[in-house]
């Protein structure tokens, strides 16, 4: 499905309280998990050792790092929404981040995005998005958060 397009960040104010987009499904591979472990130095066995995870983990397999799931939000948003007209976009931070369910290797996830608020700042729009990272065929999401993004005009 093509992304939801907003041609001007000033329009965001009229979208408060609405769901704006859902990304396509994305696979989570062991290679991604390994690359993330290498980049961050987080080599905990539950992410990397498939045999041990099968034996000892309550999940029966390796799982993605919570921060890997979180880091994919911007990419998932790019698949779900296309907000144009800003000269610069800055990740301003996160509120209320939780990881309700593990994202198992070889599962698929997608992002669901809504707009909580959009406020004018000098030369910018300050937006807070609700983000739910859904896991295919799972009742609980892999991540829920509020993502703060600033669109400089």
Image: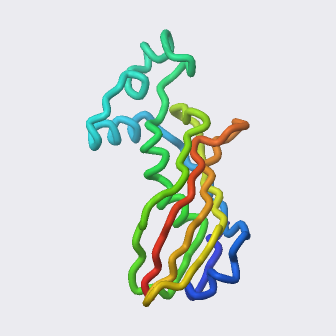
Where in the figure is residue 130, as x and y percent of width and height? 62, 60
In the image, what residue occupies the spot 43% across and 44% down?
68
Which of the 4 quarters of the picture holds residue 13? bottom right
In the image, what residue occupies the spot 71% across and 66% down?
19
Q: In this view, does 119 lie above or below 25?
A: below
Q: Which residue lies furthest to the top in this view?
A: 55
Q: In this view, does 27 lie above or below 94?
A: above
In the picture provided, is 130 more to the left or to the right than 53?
right
In the image, what residue occupies the spot 62% across and 72% down?
117
Q: Which quadrant holds the N terminus? A: bottom right
Where in the figure is residue 94, as x and y percent of width and height? 48, 57
For the residue pair 152 and 28, the one nearer the viewer reads as: 152
In the image, what residue occupies the spot 51% across and 22% down?
61
Where in the figure is residue 101, as x and y percent of width and height? 60, 34
Q: Which quadrant holds the C terminus? A: bottom left
Q: Is residue 62 above or below residue 101?
A: above
Q: In this view, does 125 lie above or below 127?
A: below
In the picture provided, is 15 more to the left or to the right than 145?
right
């Amino acid at each position: 499905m093509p992304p939801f397009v907003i041609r001007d960040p000033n329009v965001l104010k009229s979208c408060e309280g609405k769901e704006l987009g859902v990304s396509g499904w994305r696979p989570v591979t062991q290679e991604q998990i390994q690359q993330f472990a290498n980049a961050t130095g987080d080599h905990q066995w539950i992410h990397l050792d498939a045999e041990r995870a099968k034996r000892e983990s309550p999940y029966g397999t390796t799982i993605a790092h919570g921060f890997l799931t979180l880091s994919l939000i911007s990419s998932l948003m790019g698949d779900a929404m296309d907000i144009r007209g800003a000269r610069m976009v800055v990740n301003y931070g996160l509120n209320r981040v939780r990881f309700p369910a593990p994202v198992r290797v070889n599962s698929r996830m997608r992002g669901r995005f809504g707009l909580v608020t959009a406020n004018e700042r000098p030369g910018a729009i300050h937006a807070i998005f609700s983000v739910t990272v859904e896991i295919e065929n799972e009742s609980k999401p892999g991540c829920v958060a509020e993502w703060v993004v600033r669109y400089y005009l």
